[in-house]
Image (tube, rainbow, N blue to C red):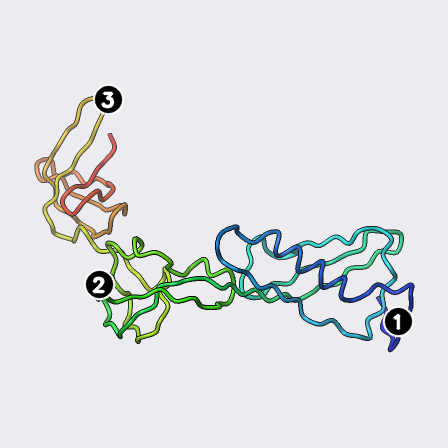
Amino acid sequence: MTVAPWVSASTQPLPAIQAAAEEFVRAHLPDGSAKHFVTASDLDPRLRLHMCKVPLEAFAPHTNSFAARVTIGVRCPGDAPWTVYVPVAIETEVSVLVLRRALARRARVTLADVEPQVRRLPGTAANFITDTASLQGHRLRRALPAGSALTADTLAPDILVRRGQQVTLIAQSGGVEIRARGQALTEGAAHDRVRVQNVSSLKVVEGVVESDSVVRVGL
């Protein structure tokens, strides 16, 4: 790789390298209704590379998933090979749920608290909440001001079983269901694994939270 203040007909056009990087990213973004904006950074105009006689190859050298910024490699696999690394920015325009008013930590988010807004966000916006069904059974992990776009990490699932709580242990083998009384030793949300002590046998078992009163265990 060399640099020079001029280019010739035998020099690879830099926009073609940028376009190859952008096209690679677009091809690997998730399908859906969201609109993606992919922009390769400008390359040094002094960069002078031999014109590639075969199609350029683009690749992701460091990751298979794309954040707001990613580096894409573009190479010429021909007789005079070269490789350039191109920074690429990704933004996504998508309708997300936004708070109408400020809410305190541990507050439950209701339909009246949110409204959909189209926003242009960094990255693929995969972590943002787009439908109200995702709010069910969750509370805020921390206080948020009005206008905040909700993300998966701002919500915490409701704790259904708490330490010391009396629960029903259910185990099933074939067509036989066995029930026993238990006391939770740890707390958990739906589908979490918790430790429970069988009140009768005093044996400690581990099971999965099924509801606010049921823990299912394996035999």
Q: Which of 147 and 216 is in front in this view?
A: 147
Please give left or right for residue 36 compared with residue 129 in the image: right
Image quadrant assignment for residue 148: bottom left
Above or below residue 169? Residue 106 is below
Residue furthest to the top in view is 175
Identify the element where label 2 is drawn.
loop
Q: Residue at x 31, y 61 (%)?
A: 155
Res 89 label = none
State how far apart marks 3 and 1 are (Cα): 76 Å
First in residue order: circle 2 vs circle 3: 2
Above or below residue 110? Residue 4 is below
Please give left or right for residue 38 compared with residue 170 in the image: right
Identify the element where label 3 is drawn.
loop
Q: Quadrant of the N terminus?
A: bottom right
Q: Which residue is drawn at 48% across and 67% down?
A: 121
Q: Nearer the viewer, residue 78 or 90?
A: 90
First in residue order: circle 3 vs circle 1: 1
The residue tagged 2 is: 108
Q: Picture coordinates of residue 77 (x, y %)?
A: 81, 51
Q: In which quarter of the image is the C terminus?
A: top left
Q: Picture coordinates of residue 75 (x, y %)?
A: 77, 56
Above or below residue 181? Residue 134 is below
Identify the amino acid type marked 2: Arg
Identify the amino acid type marked 1: Val
Q: Picture coordinates of residue 20 (x, y %)?
A: 72, 58
Mark 3 is surrounded, within 10 Å at the Cα level, by few (under 14), some (14 to 19) or many (20 or more) other residues, namely few
Are the residues at dot 2 and dot 3 in contact (C-beta closer than 8 Å)?
A: no
The residue tagged 1 is: 7
Q: Nearer the viewer, residue 168 or 129?
A: 129
